[in-house]
Image (spheres, helix red, strand yellow):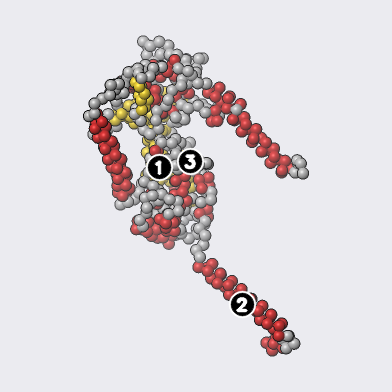
């Protein structure tokens, strides 16, 4: 056969032979390149597809410094500083606990409650589906690999600063990558999956999260558990200083009137875009107590507990209580502002008080600052959650990191307090009446932030100009911005329908 192939070249010219040799060289080079590419492809690690891994549904409890973030909720547009959710989502993606393409939406993410810019949380709770090492029955080899991952995480030093693409995050992602295992079907028994040998979710996330966000614990949950709708109670704290001239007994009198089920339209921010909001909420308890006996005796906290709250409700409650405490308002103003229904008016809170005024529209007043507000706790049924903190031996480092942050903040507060004392040694100005709280010409706007105005003529809340009722706010929004949005949606829907049916201009 070889002689036959050679024989056919006997009649070829010199140029034909050269062309044939060039063609063979090209084919040989192409074959060698393909061989090299195949070999390199075999050496490359398989792409890590989080969506193909077994999953389980969990709840995460975490805390965060609100003053460092633009609120909790992830925003679609630009924010001057990051949101808590955007940082948390990046950490979950970097550690390959959720799919990087689908993000929160693909993980069935839900939160107990939203906190606005500047508001902190000590016990925020979220629920979502995350990658699991035990779902689907991980074998001994996979469990051993998980243990090796944990040891490697302990040996690796992670930078405290949070950057989505830092080398430390990439290393954590690489260490957490295990072999493909079959997807587990979602059922109502997945919360019974074992926790032993599972990914240490709290510790893994804390390795890449900034110090201002700390995961406290995780818990297995039912597949139908939702952090928001499964929550049976929320507890907020609002911290403030008990300035001279602030009558705590008057504030407690006003707070007692807030307990129970009321229409809170005059203690929240109205927004027509929220739709037909039900403003009736139940407050289980309202107290004003010292923060701690062994700390600054002037530090107090307003505790408010209930099932659900309206937008900025706690900050409005604090603002009114501060006005009452300064003697600028009578405690009965709370009863009047909760008296919104002419057909079913509230009786006087006490027998010696006159009938409370009916206030259908919210008086114009400034709400309290966001900085001292903390979402302290979210309550759930005992059978819904079983919190699992870091393993013994690792929690000590976690507590130490919180202690370090606290100590730094304490030093700053101490230094500022000495600055205040140094300023008090200076001769007071002629018109120094700013510290005489309770005067009608000196109004402390916010006990938490310490803002005040002097030389003003205070106008009682019930004599101020009032805003629109919730029905009027909703109607104006629907006639204005809401109506324009509805028209745009209808136009887009009509265009989509025309494209699907082939109608319209050519």
Q: Position of residue 322 (x, y in %)?
A: 36, 23
Q: Residues within 10 Å of mark 3 (few under 14, many from 20)?
A: few
Image quarter in which the N terminus is found? bottom right
Judge depth for marks 1 and 2 and give the one in front.
2
- Along the viewing direction, whichever of 31 and 219 lies nearer the viewer: 31
Gap in angstroms between the C-alphas marked 3 and 1: 25 Å
Q: Which mark is residue 61?
A: 1
Q: Position of residue 494 (x, y in %)?
A: 69, 37
Determine whether 370 is above or below 321 in the image.
below
Determine whether 198 is above or below 378 in the image.
below
Judge depth for marks 3 and 1 and give the one in front.
3
Question: Are the two marked residues, 3 and 1, in contact with CB atoms closer than 8 angstroms?
Answer: no
Question: Are the two marked residues, 1 and 2, in contact with CB atoms closer than 8 angstroms?
Answer: no
Q: Residue at x 44, y 49 (%)?
A: 91
Q: Residues within 10 Å of mark 1 (few under 14, many from 20)?
A: many
Q: Which mark is residue 28?
A: 2
Image quarter in which the C terminus is found? top right
User: To which residue does mark 3 refer?
Assistant: 79
């Amino acid at each position: 056969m070889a002689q036959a192939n050679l024989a056919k070249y006997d009649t070829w010219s010199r140029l034909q032979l050269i062309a044939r040799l060039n063609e063979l060289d090209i084919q040989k080079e192409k074959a060698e390149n393909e061989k090299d590419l195949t070999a390199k492809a075999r050496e490359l690690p398989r792409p890590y597809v989080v969506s193909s891994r077994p999953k389980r549904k969990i709840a995460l409890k975490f805390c965060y410094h609100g003053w460092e973030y633009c609120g909790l909720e992830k925003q679609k547009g630009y924010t001057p500083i990051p949101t808590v959710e955007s940082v948390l989502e990046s950490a979950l993606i970097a550690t390959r606990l959720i799919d990087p393409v689908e993000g929160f939406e693909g993980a069935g993410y839900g939160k107990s409650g939203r906190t606005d810019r500047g508001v902190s949380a000590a016990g925020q709770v979220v629920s979502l589906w995350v990658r699991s090492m035990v779902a689907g029955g991980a074998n001994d080899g996979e469990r051993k690999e998980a243990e090796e991952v944990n040891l490697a995480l302990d040996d690796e030093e992670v930078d405290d600063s949070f950057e989505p693409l830092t080398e430390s995050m990439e290393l954590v992602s690489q260490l957490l990558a295990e072999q493909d295992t079959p997807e587990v079907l979602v059922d109502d028994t997945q919360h019974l999956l074992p926790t032993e040998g599972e990914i240490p979710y709290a510790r893994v996330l804390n390795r890449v999260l900034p110090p201002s966000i700390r995961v406290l614990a995780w818990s297995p949950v039912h597949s139908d558990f939702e952090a928001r709708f499964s929550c049976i109670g929320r507890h907020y704290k609002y911290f403030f200083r008990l300035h001279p001239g602030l009558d705590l007994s008057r504030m407690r009198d006003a707070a007692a009137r807030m307990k129970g089920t009321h229409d809170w339209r005059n203690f929240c921010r109205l927004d027509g875009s929220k739709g037909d909001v039900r403003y009736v909420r139940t407050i289980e308890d309202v107290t004003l107590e010292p923060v701690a006996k062994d700390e600054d005796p002037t530090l107090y906290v307003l505790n408010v507990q209930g099932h659900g709250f309206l937008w900025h409700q706690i900050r409005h409650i604090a603002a009114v209580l501060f006005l009452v405490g300064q003697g600028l308002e009578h405690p009965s103003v709370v009863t009047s502002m909760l008296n919104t229904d002419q057909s079913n008016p509230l009786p006087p809170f006490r027998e010696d008080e006159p009938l409370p005024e009916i206030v259908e529209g919210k008086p114009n007043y400034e709400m309290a600052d966001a900085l001292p507000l903390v979402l302290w706790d979210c309550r759930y049924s005992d059978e819904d959650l079983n919190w699992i903190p870091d393993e013994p031996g690792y929690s000590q480092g976690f507590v130490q990191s919180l202690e370090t942050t606290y100590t730094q903040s304490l030093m700053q507060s101490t230094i500022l307090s000495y600055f205040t004392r140094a300023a008090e040694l200076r001769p007071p100005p002629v018109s120094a009446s700013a510290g005489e709280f309770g005067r009608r010409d000196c109004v402390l706007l916010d006990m938490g932030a310490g803002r005040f105005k002097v030389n003003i003529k205070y106008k009682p809340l019930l004599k101020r100009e009032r805003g629109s009722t919730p029905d009027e706010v909703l109607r104006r929004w629907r006639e204005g911005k809401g109506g324009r949005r509805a028209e745009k949606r209808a136009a887009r829907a009509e265009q989509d329908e025309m494209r699907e049916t082939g109608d319209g201009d050519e």
